[in-house]
Amino acid sequence: MIMINIVDMKIMNLENQDKIKKIISIILLFFWCILIFYFSNQVGIVSEGSSSRVINIINKIFNINLYNYKYSSFIIRKLAHMFLYFVLYLLSLNVCNNYKFNKKYLYAFLFCFIYSVSDEVHQLFIFERSFQLMDILIDMLGSTISFCVIKIISCFNSNFRIKRGNDEGENIK
């Protein structure tokens, strides 16, 4: 009877850990969406100022003057889009993993796409901002790169496990 209670307690602990993981993954995704919304909600001049600050930091770190380059601000802004949606894909995939969805990669990608489109629609209502189809494509490129990185890492991990298991004398078919 005591042994059964210990097993039950361990099962309850695992269930609680799963619930906590689910809640944390949703909270992280929610806050990342708020961050994207915050950036999208900035009027054009404020958004341009953010890009200028990033360029200043890069100039100081690498001792170059990006202001000499015609498209530096444009490139920084598009890289920011890619980065935001790279992370958004990771976080949405994490939620899908925690809920054990069968088509987790597709659902995470669809979430990023829908959020990207809604983000661009939102910008229609912000002064000096507009709906940009190119931004949606760049956002999806960031999500796609995230997917590719995950697949490459998982491929390396599975190869590492196979080699490691083989070194320990296990037969692998």
Image (tube, rainbow, N blue to C red):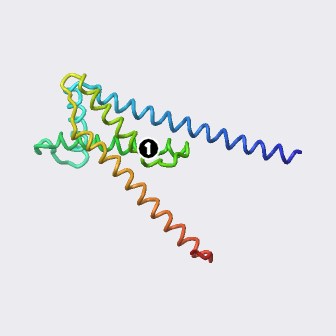
Please indicate whether residue 101 sits to the left or right of residue 44 in the image. Answer: right
Kindly identify the residue that appears in the image at 84 percent across and 46 percent down.
4
SS label for mark 1:
helix
The quarter of the image holding the N terminus is: top right
Q: Type of residue at label 1?
A: Tyr
Residue 17: where, in percent of width, then height? Answer: 64, 41
Kindly identify the residue that appears in the image at 18 percent across and 25 percent down.
128
Residue 13: where, in percent of width, then height? Answer: 70, 41
The quarter of the image holding the C terminus is: bottom right
Please indicate whether residue 170 sits to the left or right of residue 128 in the image. Answer: right
Please indicate whether residue 24 sits to the left or right of residue 18 in the image. Answer: left
Residue behind mark 1: 107
- Taking the view exactly as shown, the residue that stands out farthest to the front is 102
The quarter of the displayed image where residue 124 is located: top left
Please indicate whether residue 121 sits to the left or right of residue 157 in the image. Answer: left
Residue 42: where, in percent of width, then height? Answer: 27, 26
The quarter of the displayed image where residue 10 is located: top right
Nearer to the camera, 88 or 71: 88
- Crowd around label 1: few <14 · some 14–19 · many ≥20 (10 Å): some
Kindly identify the residue that appears in the image at 49 percent across and 44 percent down.
94
Residue 99: where, in percent of width, then height? Answer: 55, 42
